[in-house]
Image: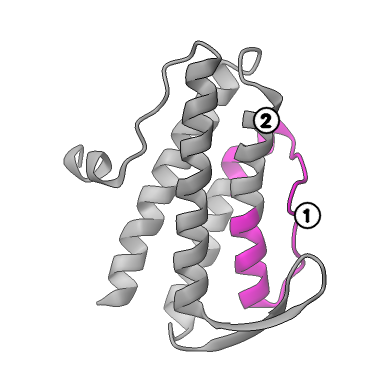
Amino acid sequence: MMKEHFKDLLEYNLHFNQLLIQNFMENNLVWSEKSKSLLNHILNAHQIWNARILNQRTFEVWQINFDESLLKINSDNFNNTLEILNQKELTEIISYKNSIGKEFNNTIQEVLFHFLNHSTYHRGQIALLMKQGGLEPINTDYIFYKRDL
């Protein structure tokens, strides 16, 4: 049941990240550098958390990816998290080091909730920056996503 809930939230996350990436690609001359940085950060953080769980190489927290790679990174992040949901227990504890090398332990469930919440937070910041830049912000509220299904 909880895994299905996380799958639903991951689909929501994938959907609105895709819409933001498409908006960025169409309006990249209007998007601020801060918005571009935040968009990349959302994708990087998701990749980092997946990689920590799967013991893979991580991106840098604030790296700027090639614009053409953003949709693939978003899709790969989604697919890797689905793999985690299929192969691991949500209660499994992972040990990892943060970006400054300090070690922590958290359950996979806590990690999934964290990066989904983190993504929502930064999408809200991007919406504000889009509005300030004269663009129509994308309403990325979860309930609007569910209403449109």
At 35% from the left and 58% from the top, the residue drawn is 9
Where 69 sits versus 96, above or below? above
Q: Secondary structure at mark 2?
A: helix
Q: What is the three-letter code of the residue carrying label 2?
A: Lys
Q: Quadrant of residue 70?
A: top right
In this view, the mark in front (1 or 2): 2
Q: What is the three-letter code of the residue carrying label 1?
A: Glu
> Is 63 covered by the magenta stretch?
yes
Q: Which mark is residue 60?
A: 1
- Please indicate whether residue 127 sits to the left or right of residue 61 in the image: left
In the rendered image, the residue lying farthest to the right is 101
Range shown magenta: 45-73
Q: Quadrant of residue 7?
A: bottom left
Q: Which mark is residue 34?
A: 2
- Please indicate whether residue 128 sits to the left or right of residue 147 in the image: right
Q: Which mark is residue 76?
A: none
Q: What is the spatial separation of the Cα atoms under label 1 and label 2, in whole angstroms?
A: 17 Å
At 34% from the left and 31% from the top, the residue drawn is 139
